[in-house]
Amino acid sequence: MMIRNATILASWKGSAAMKFVRRIVTLWSFAVLTVALCAQIPAPPQFQPIYLVGGTIHTGDGRVIPNGVIGFRDGKITVVTTRDAFREDTAQGKIINVEGKHLYPGLIALNTTLGLREIDAVRATRDEREVGELNPNVRAIIAYNVDSKIIPTVRSNGILLAQIVPRGPVVPGLSSVVQLDGWTWEEAAYAVDNGLHVVWPLASRIQRRDHSRSPHTKQRKDWAQERFRKIKKLFDDARLYCQASEPRQINLKLAAVCEVLRGRRRLFVHTNDAKGILSAVEFFKAYGIRPIIVGGAQADRVIDVLKRDSIPVVVTGTHRMPPQADAPIDHPYTLPATLYRHQILFAIAAGGTWMQRNLPFHVGTAIAYGLPYEEGVKAVTSNAAKILGIDDRCGMLAPGYDATLIVCAGDLFNPATSIVEMAFLQGRQVDLTDMHKQLYQKYLIRYGLQRR
Amino acid sequence: MRWWIGWILCCLLALSVQAQEALPTFPINGITDNRPSVYVLTNARIVIAPGKVLEQGSLLIAKGKIVAVGPSVTIPPEAHVIDVSGKTIYPSFIDLDSDYGVPKPPKSSWRWDAGPQMESKRKEAFGWNDALHPERRAAEQFVVDPDRARRYCQMGFGAVLTFQHDGIARGISALVATGIGKANKMVLVPEVAAHFSFDKGSSQQDYPGSLMGAIALLRQTYYDAEWYRSGGWKAAYNITLDAWNHLLKLPQIFEVRDKLDILRVDKIGDEFGIQYIIRSAGDAYQRLDEVKATQAPLIVPLNFPLPYDVEDPFDAAKASFVQLKHWELAPRNPALLHQAGIPFALTSSGIRSPETFWQNLRKAVRYGLPEEAALAALTTVPAKLIGVDHLLGTLEPGKLANFFITDGDVFTEDATIYEHWVLGQPLSFYPLTQPSLLGVYAFQIDTLHWQLRIDGSIAHPKATVIIDSATQIRGKVRRKQQLLTFRFRFDTVWNGVVRLSGWWQDSLLIGKAELPSGKWVSWQARWQAPIEKKPPEADTVDLSQLGPILYPFAPYGWDTLPKPHTYLIRNATVWTNEPEGVLPNTDVLIRDGKIAAVGQNLSAPQDAIIIDATGKHVTPGIVDEHSHIAISRGVNEATQAVTAEVRIGDVINSEDVNIYRALAGGVTTVHLLHGSANPIGGQTALIKTRWGFPPEQLKFAGAPPFIKFALGENVKQSNWGDKYTVRYPQTRMGVEQVFRDAFTRALEYEQRWKRWRANGNSNGGIPPRRDLELEALLEILHGKRFITCHSYVQSEILALMRVAEDFGFRVNTFTHVLEGYKVAKEMKVHGAAASTFSDWWAYKYEVIEAIPYNAAILDRVGVLTGINSDSPETGRRLNQEAAKAVKYGGLSEEEALKLVTLNPARMLHIDDRVGSIRVGKDADIVIWSDRPLSIYARAEKTFVDGILFYDLERDQQLRQEIAAERQRIIRKMLEEKKKGRPTQKGHPAKERWDHCLDREP
């Protein structure tokens, strides 16, 4: 009996089956370690200079440096140059070889509810829409949930900054810019309350929303008019309010608008409609405000006005349907190239929360349809930074700028090669694991598969 | 003061008419006053029937009927003789679509947030569905409405088919005369036709919630009625089924919303041996061949669309291309139907004013409808369609005395109807005897000599003073019996308004005028010549200038449908999906719709079109396993937990531009699914993207049938709002039981039929009822129908597989299946395929552990795996979605390409036809500009069955054509507006982007 067992044991040892089991055990113990960590830990501040050497650097201002070097210290970029021209003393620093890889500034996601909304269909997890039509005073930043499970999945695709925007029917509130890493929202905050958002009232838009309730076109139009009047009154009252040296009574709403009138806060107008863009631009001209158009599906029809008044446009995605059945079927794909050709300042955004991780591919499609590659880079880096007013600090890879950048295995905008291997936020190396990678790991174990 | 005297006289007159019409069985309050009512109209031009005209003759009528008609008739002594020389008598028109005199249906107060109403609220012994009213009889509801009767008479209609337009089965119509009198007299035929539609009308019951549901309800009710007839009545009394059987013997009239509905209706008719008469929507010309093939007679509306207000270019953009095109071509519809030899009647339905009716009728004639055919479509054809040609339609002896008298050809502009006689009683619009004012006159006022021109119609003359060719002053003219009043504004001569008053004296108009100064002068106008009738220039139509009819009638449609050719694609990188893998520098020969050869340096057949594909990539066409494009009016029959009876195949929308957009993304086969609102949804349809072909020809012939199932939050209505908490099931536990119950019922159903067939007289002679829902479920149990099941979490995936195993079948496909990666092993053992999204998650609780590595894990474990779109947006770039499986999970590009080509073809059991590039397979082929999974790749050419359906170059050309066509029609509309014609605002028909995740599709 013993002998037989021993034989079995011997044959078992070194057999394929045993190797298999051993592999499983190794995989499991590794997985327990990573899965047990569960959440991603915010990175500590940069403690040593880092040099990324040998990669193709897309600087974010239209230039490409093949076989380049980028160095950063204390969170700021110190050098961006070609390998040949690189002279800095690297003794104190850490050198990372990134040959064959592509470097980009960290992508900036505009117009998102990331961190405000966790599960679309579960009301308790939705924090982006306050009651009422006029909420210029509500602040998205304080509801921003740094521990959202969605954020790491977005970050691991190269998006390192985001504009967190509240939603609503008329004036949803104030947006802020955050870094997608940090222990608290205060730590994550990058530019606080720097944008006020207005949803431009439009007969056709409201028609769509209230379609079932209002059978008469006229009534629908009045609705739009009503909202328009509300916006006008808000801005008129705010103008008076901030002219007064000492307001008689503090009004949070008017005070919030004042900051826009004083030029200290940007105004984002959400509209896709050509007529809406025209009327919004004209309307705010009277207040000395140059709005930023968010949406802009039909921006190509009002190019002249956009150009004349230097109105920037946030194109909310290229993966959209054409605006009408008879529109060119690639209309949303070509829109960025059209805006570029006419020298309109524009950025590309993606919709929603989790879909932010597809932001690079919206750019890829724009490139496929005529946008020059480096202009595509700009559309999610320096142009976005300009639109947000943070272009003095980020959006570009140049000395003095934040060391906020990513290293990608290949072309970031092409899904098959878009594998982000490293990310730095102000020099801190960000954890690129996420819940999805962890679940992937977990179930590879179930099936005894190797990670590819 | 005087007007009320007139009124009293009128009323007295009306009373006296009534006295003459005394009805049998009705008591008379007063003295009997029966009069003969015999009339002879002499010296008339009589249109006896379309194409049969008596240039000079008489018409004798008595007691409401025509007694004689001919060049001369014997005039009985008691007859009133009316001389109508110079005038024309037409037989009255018949309108087959009217709700004249019947009550308006109650408005549906349905609201999406009101909560469900699953059962009928009626307490009487009706059938189960509130949208069926076969028992309604218009004859019992009809009352005379004098205002509308007059309007109908002014349009030429003497009889209309009326019924309440409410619901899917609308009951029985009555043919009523449009005279003024007792309703008893006006009802000519109390039971004429049975009426149907796909619109549930005032019913607030949930079912049917979609077009396919309406079709299923109709089909099931026909079977139910058959069952009721053959013994079901013994089980329980049912008003609805009883009435349904009663109306089967009548002509069946079906009202539809568009041309595709015509084909749908005909298909129902074929199943039950019924040839419907179809009340069409005026767009039948857009699918003329298919409409003709139905052999259905049509009722065709004359309410052509108004031009759109296109002055503001941004608003102009809101009028869709289809709306613009249809506006231009709609008046051509009757002419095209006539040319195609399709029998049709015209209806005034939708038109309120008689002027518009006549304008549109004349427009139809100007657009090519022969006058005789137009007349027939208003008289003999409708009479024959409803079997009343012995009563109406022509002016032959024995028929009803329904006719109208005009000043001439009714198809010329400004023709005037003097009188309309209904049942031998005249309704007068303009005095017969009064002479016409129309003509050119020598006009003298004070000392000045000018010309006066009076034109327009006899009833509504218009006056113009012609001072010289440059100066013409339009004035107002009013006429009361012999007195005339004119008003002219002579600014240049007298600096103000001149009022003329006068009378008719032989061929002289004569009278006094007051000048602005207050001075009175004399005037006169001597008749010189008649008005030369010429059609105004603007209204002549050059038919050759009309835009083409497109197939489909949509942007990017074809003038003529494309045909297969022999193509040789040269020197491409060919991704075969076969063991050969990716072949560089390879040729592909397409012939007779199939892949004829794959290899290097193939010799080109003589007739081959050679395509140089150097540097390009060739792949099989993309197969989208889960899509909701190209579906008409409702993706979900969301109303009941089990709706296996509804069929997407009934509601394929060949006109959806998303088919074209899919082609542009290299998609050649699309599985159209029912939504996911209920555990057992509807039967699916598999189509090829044969853009331009009619619905039936889009279908993938020979593909095995599927049905949609669904699990989880959608079917338990988790995200439907607080009102939706009553429909069973509300939990995953209940969902599982719904399946077990449904399959158990299906098996019992089968047993019932077996027993009945073995021993016919069991169950008290009541046969089993044919049940379309259970029959579809039986097909599943017998392996003749496959399931594709919307699913998310692992528990429910396992549960359904176990239910299937217990009932002895296999779940073919789990679609979405975002937690498939957790049970990949179990799925593999069961043999289920997985059709998933690339990277969707976080949109609801059940997808909280969805990961983008799902496809890769499933594929590597050995589950047959695909990636689908479930969205028209994603559906046009599925190659990019497949590429994400390279990024997430490290599949090779070849493996990833199979996720959207060969693998879905295999799960649909069509891989012997499509999914790879192999000799003998269908030539469904895409030529890409780059590696097919690259985001930079564009489909340059897409072939389906060897037909080049999408070509990037042609697309560029079509864009320009569309823009030019828009501009051309917009210019035409601007002219219309300049002429002062009414316009409407453009509202683009909202594109519905159906998505099975949505509660409201």
Image (cartoon, coloured by chain):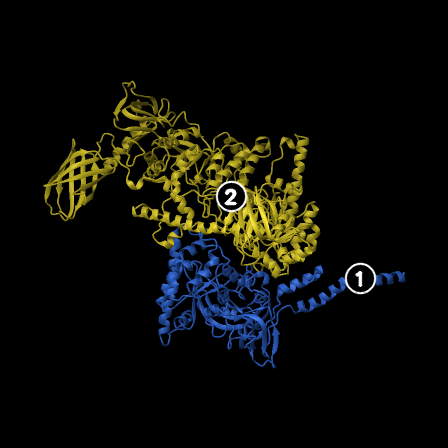
Chain colours: A blue, B yellow
Q: Are marks 2 and 1 in contact (CB under 8 Å)?
A: no
Mark 2 chain? B
Q: Which element carries disc 2, helix, strand or loop?
A: helix
Q: Which mark is residue B177?
A: none
User: What residue is shown with label 2?
Assistant: B211
Q: Is residue B120 visible?
A: no
Q: Which mark is residue A15?
A: 1
Q: Is residue B603 above or below residue B294?
A: below
Q: Which element carries disc 1, helix, strand or loop?
A: loop
Q: Is residue A334 visible?
A: yes
Q: Nearer the viewer, residue A360 or B202?
A: A360
Mark 1 chain? A
Q: Is residue B241 left or right of residue B478?
A: right
Dot 1 amino acid type? Ser
How many callouts does the rendering have?
2
Rate crowding at label 1 as few (under 14), some (14 to 19) or many (20 or more) other CA atoms within 10 Å: few
Q: Position of residue A381 (x, y in %)?
A: 50, 68
Q: Nearer the viewer, residue A43 or A246?
A: A43
Q: Position of residue A45 (x, y in %)?
A: 58, 77
As measured in the structure, the alpha-carbon distance from the residue carrying label 2 to the one carrying label 1 is 63 Å
Q: Position of residue A155 (x, y in %)?
A: 57, 67
Q: Is residue B769 left or right of residue B111?
A: right
Q: Is residue A107 above or below residue B640?
A: below
Q: Quadrant of the N terminus of chain B?
A: top left
Q: Nearer the viewer, residue B813 or B740?
A: B813
Dot 2 amino acid type? Leu
Q: Is residue B74 above or below residue A84?
A: above
Q: Is residue B172 left or right of residue B512?
A: right
Rate crowding at label 2 as few (under 14), some (14 to 19) or many (20 or more) other CA atoms within 10 Å: many
